[in-house]
Amino acid sequence: MDQSTTTRIVRHYRAAHRAPAADVFALLCPVREYDWIEPWQCMLIHSASGVAELDCVFKTDFAQNGGPETWTCSCYDPPRRIDYVIVGAHRVTRLSILLDEAGGGGCNSVWTRVYTALDEKGARLLAGIDEATYAAQHAALERMLNHYLATGARLTLDAALGAASAHMDEPG
């Protein structure tokens, strides 16, 4: 692949939470995601504090993402913004999560992912990340996060996907 054939896509998702930004931000961490994301798994490589921080490094290995990926926290501005650069064999992704306070003690989050394919397999992976798929995946994450914030318990992936699908099918 040369630059003229490189595939890049950008996806956004806006979520609403009934908790303050500080509470949501604390959960956007490779260690704390075990509390609320099923099936989250990672291997923490470096963190002086043991949780998310600037230059924190960890690895994941999800088949649907093309195999092992290394994540580095590239921006850490609690409780407003956290960014990760995610490098795998077939793609590079920048994940940026911005939080802003909303009325009633809640907050909003905007999740932006910039995906860049590194090879043909990466281009095929990106082709599977259409707007609807991205929205459905992030709606499930939103449900899991909000369920945890409300109950302190993890929502199963099946329940989150079912709730997200039902919500997407609602009129208006």
Image (cartoon, rainbow, N blue to C red):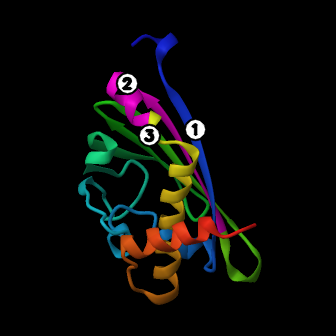
Q: Would you call the spot at circle 1 few (<14 residues within 10 Å), some (14-19), or many (20 or more)? A: some
Task: Kindly report which numbered mark, 3 or 1, lies closer to the viewer in this rendering.
Answer: 3
- Residue 107 sits inside the magenta stretch: no
Numbered badge on residue 122: none
Q: Between disc 3 and disc 1, whose residue precedes?
A: 1
What amino acid type is highlighted by mark number 1? Val
Task: Kindly report which numbered mark, 3 or 2, lies closer to the viewer in this rendering.
Answer: 3
Rendered position, 15 above or below 22: above
In the image, which residues are magenta?
A: 108-126
Numbered badge on residue 128: 3
Q: Are marks 2 and 1 in contact (CB under 8 Å)?
A: no
* Element on which disc 3 rests: loop
Residue drawn at point x = 52 percent, y = 86 percent: 150
* Element on which disc 1 rests: strand
Q: Residue furthest bottom?
A: 151
Q: Is residue 50 left or right of residue 4?
A: left
The location of residue 62, given as percent across then percent down, is: 27, 50
- Whole-angstrom CA distance, mark 3 to mark 1, is 13 Å
What amino acid type is highlighted by mark number 2? Leu
How many numbered marks have been drawn onto this rendered protein structure?
3
Q: Are marks 3 and 2 in contact (CB under 8 Å)?
A: no
What amino acid type is highlighted by mark number 3? Gly
| Snapshot quadrant of residue 27 | bottom left
Q: Which residue is mark 1?
A: 10
- Whole-angstrom CA distance, mark 2 to mark 1, is 15 Å
The location of residue 165, given as percent across then percent down, is: 53, 66
Numbered badge on residue 118: 2
